[in-house]
Image (tube, rainbow, N blue to C red):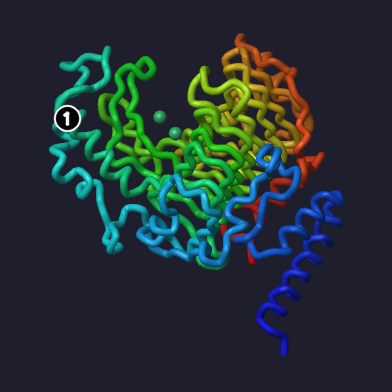
Amino acid sequence: MASPSHRRSLRKRRTIVVASAALAATGLGAVAFVMNANAGAVDLAHQSLPAKDGWAASGSGTTGGSQADSAHVYTVSTRAQLVKALGSSGNSTAKIIQIKGTIDANTDDAGKKLTCATYASGTGYSLAAYLKAFDPATYGTSKLPSGTQETARAAAQAKQAKNIVFKVPANTTIVGVPGTKAGLTGASLQVKDVDNVIIRNLTLTATEDCFPQWDPTDGSLGEWNSNYDSVTLRGATHVWADHNSFSDSPFFDKSETTYFGRKYQIHDGALDITNGSDLVTVERNQFTNHDKTMLIGSSDTDSVGKLRVSIHHNVWKGITQRAPLARIGQIHLYNNVYDTASLNGYEPKYSLDSRAKAQVVAEYNSWTLPSGAKVAKLLSGDGTGSVAGSGNLVNGTATDLVAAYNAANSKKLKTTVNWTPALTAGLQTSAKNLPTELATTTGAGVLTD
Ligand code: CA
Ligand code: CA
């Protein structure tokens, strides 16, 4: 009788054969096949980023926690277990954290649900008092809120942050257990000043700030700003984000209240890559139902020489903007699928913004536009960013997006870049079949052991 592990290896082999047949049918090259064979050789939790798979494969590559000994392989299904498995942020022992089912970040150590009111309690904060204190009619519009209610808001926000922000240490893999609808809700994974992290097969939803801050100086009308991205990379290097599903679901921006004439925004980014982060591969994720989706570089003075990011085979659907907003870095955007029909109130503004001298190569991506939508609106820029690359399709037709944008705008995108992508394993030189292919091969829940 076959042992369980023998059965497992048989199943793996079958998966590889099927995959290679499918790849042959779609005309993919040998590189993609070898990648798949490697991926099948070890279980999901112990896999590393394949060779040459984007910027995160640079140098020592990205192995996450794959080298963990058996004492550092954890399976967690509560917030408290996750916190314990992560350990201190300075601990760099290789570790694998397998998430089973959905963990609600807004719960206490005993698993009890925590609400915004719980976090506010004891701080003296109330939204009504905050709105009264900083009403532009009396407080003006020239300075950020300060005083009793702002101090109270910040204290309440800090209480929520302590609960929902999970600091990911170096040499860590966080992976969803297949077949368990694995993920985090209400959480913010923070990868800060550490190297070598893998985040895979997770559904990441409802990352919400209970305590947005009013900033009357943000833009001409002021903005309510929130603090948390579902995943935040700050000063992080060698990060592989693969097969995750990001969404604001179930609470969408269209349901947000308006105060001071501006939307009370409880969401920030889905996956933000800032503060000198470098060598990142963002692959086969689904981004849906979100406004400010992916920021690369937090300001025009974020680190020169870093912010190198590969973004491939992702699906962007129901996204308002920043898919991504790119600054400074060398960014390779290929084989992505964009569906720009509005969804759940998320109205598209643009897909890709290249600014602050960003060096973007965008090639073999596929856009689907609703009738009447303008190609010139798919891009954005400040007149210093570049977008090179070809092979992009709009509704199945080869289209020069940059030419369309530049014909309609005075701050033109530059069409040359200072680099040539080399870490491009899996690159497909036709975007034609991507909408069909990626519909079933991206996001959380499609990987198996
Ligand atoms: Ca913001
Ligand atoms: Ca952010």
Up/down of 448 relative to 259, above or below: below
Q: Is residue 430 left or right of residue 233?
A: right
Q: Using residue 200 as the reference point, say whether residue 264 is left or right of it.
A: left
Q: Residue at x 68, y 37 (%)?
A: 55
Q: Secondary structure at mark 1?
A: helix
Q: Nearer the viewer, residue 84 or 290?
A: 84
Q: Please tell me in which quadrant of the rendered image residue 261 appears.
A: top left
Residue where numbered disc 1 is placed: 149
- Give the percent coordinates (x, y) of residue 390: 78, 29
Against 282, is 405 above or below?
above
Q: Which residue sits at x=36%, y=43%? A: 208
Q: Quadrant of the C terminus?
A: bottom right
Left or right of 49? Residue 231 is left
Label 1 Cα crowd, 10 Å radius (few <14 / some 14-19 / many 20+):
many
In which quadrant will I find the N terminus? bottom right
Q: Residue at x 50, y 54 (%)?
A: 203
- The percent coordinates of residue 438 (x first, y second) are 68, 50
Amino acid under label 1? Gln
Q: Position of residue 182 (x, y in %)?
A: 50, 61
- Which residue is more in the foreground, 159 or 92? 92
